[in-house]
Amino acid sequence: MNNAKKLTLKFRAKTFYFASVFLPNKIRKDIENLYIFCRYVDDIGDGGNFTKKNAIKKLSQIKSQILIKKSDNLIISEFISLQIKYKINASIPIDLINGVKSDLNNVDFKNNKELLKYCYQVAGTVGYMFCKIIKVNNTKLIFRGVQLGIAMQRTNISRDIREDLESNRMYLPREARQYRGEKKKIIHNNKLKKTISEDLLSFLKQTEKFYQNSWIGIRKLPFKYAVPVSIAAELYQRIGNKIIKNNCNIWDRRIHLNKFEKVKYSFFALYKLFFLKTKLESKIDIECKCLIDNIKG
């Protein structure tokens, strides 16, 4: 199995792969190439296969290749082809790379502003590029796509707290936590883990509001894109719901949806798409206002 195949949606993002089946064929391959690029960059930031020094060097090389629009690496060159085809400004993937680069540090965000910036960099940018590939150029709709990316990243953060702590990373900001001391102590202290689970409940309730606003944009997409995007949004949102139903116990096992749940919630996503209205959470839009300049054009 080659590296590109190992990075595909089918092998690395089963929830999103399930939703991507509903994408038009001519777009699906481009979305997959976007995902392969993002996964490739993310894996460098995870630090498993590279020293910190080599990872920083590798990410810097990718940034340079994106700027000159030339690379001998097949994954990068195929992304550059997407960048040219869909007129994606180089600043967007560079923001993504900068976010991934920050993962190489011992992450411990001070506040929600730092978290929002990070979520925009590593996931909001992906929402932006997805919009470009499906030829959505309306800034307001792209803004909703960015918010969906942020919502999904917040779900990932919630699900992966234990694994991230094992890598000395904590993405729940200190201002949103009862315990703000040395994060290494959390993983071996049941009392501290309980407080983090309590904090996570509030975090996930706030995450719901990001999903809520993104649905306003989903309903305005062309039907052929609204269906797969609505399913992806609903499935990710349901992962967060499942964490809540599990009393935010993310310590014993990684929470995921089984096949039956994916089918059931996909039907609910379609019901939600056509029949339910969403109330705008204006406070979330105000929080995200700082992102407007990033997504223009």
Image (cartoon, rainbow, N blue to C red):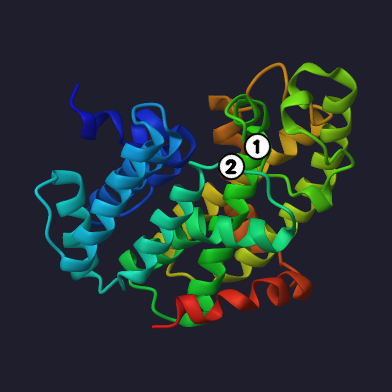
Q: Is residue 218 visible?
A: no
Rendered residue at 60%/26% (across/down): 163
Q: Position of residue 222 (x, y in %)?
A: 42, 69
Q: Position of residue 190 (x, y in %)?
A: 86, 18
Q: Position of residue 169 (x, y in %)?
A: 62, 36
Amino acid of disc 2: Leu
The location of residue 40, given as percent across then percent down, is 32, 41
Disc marking residue 235: 2
Which quadrant of the view contains residue 283?
A: bottom right
Q: Dividing the image into 4 quarters, which one contains the C terminus?
A: bottom left
Crowding near the residue tagged with mark 2, few <14, some 14–19, many ≥20 C-alpha atoms within 10 Å: many
Instruction: Kindly tell me whether residue 103 is visible in this rendering.
Output: yes
* Vertical position of residue 279 compared to residue 196: above or below: below
Q: Are marks 1 and 2 in contact (CB under 8 Å)?
A: yes
Is 100 displayed left or right of 21 in the figure? right
Task: Tell me the quarter of the image containing the N terminus.
Answer: top left
Q: Secondary structure at mark 1?
A: helix
53 lies above or below 167: below
Q: Which residue is mark 1?
A: 239
Q: Which one is nearer the viewer's eye here, 245 or 200?
A: 200
Kind of residue at badge 1: Ile
Question: Residue lying farthest front?
Answer: 53
Q: Nearer the viewer, residue 51 or 193?
A: 51
> Which tag is nearer the camera, tag 1 or tag 2?
1
Taking the spot 36% from the left edge, 62% from the top edge, the residue there is 94
**C-alpha span from label 1 to label 2:** 6 Å
Please state if 80 lies on the left or on the right of 235 as rendered: left
Dot 2: element:
helix
Query: Is residue 51 found left or right of 180 in the rendered image?
Result: left
In the picture, the disc for residue 204 is none
Number of callouts: 2
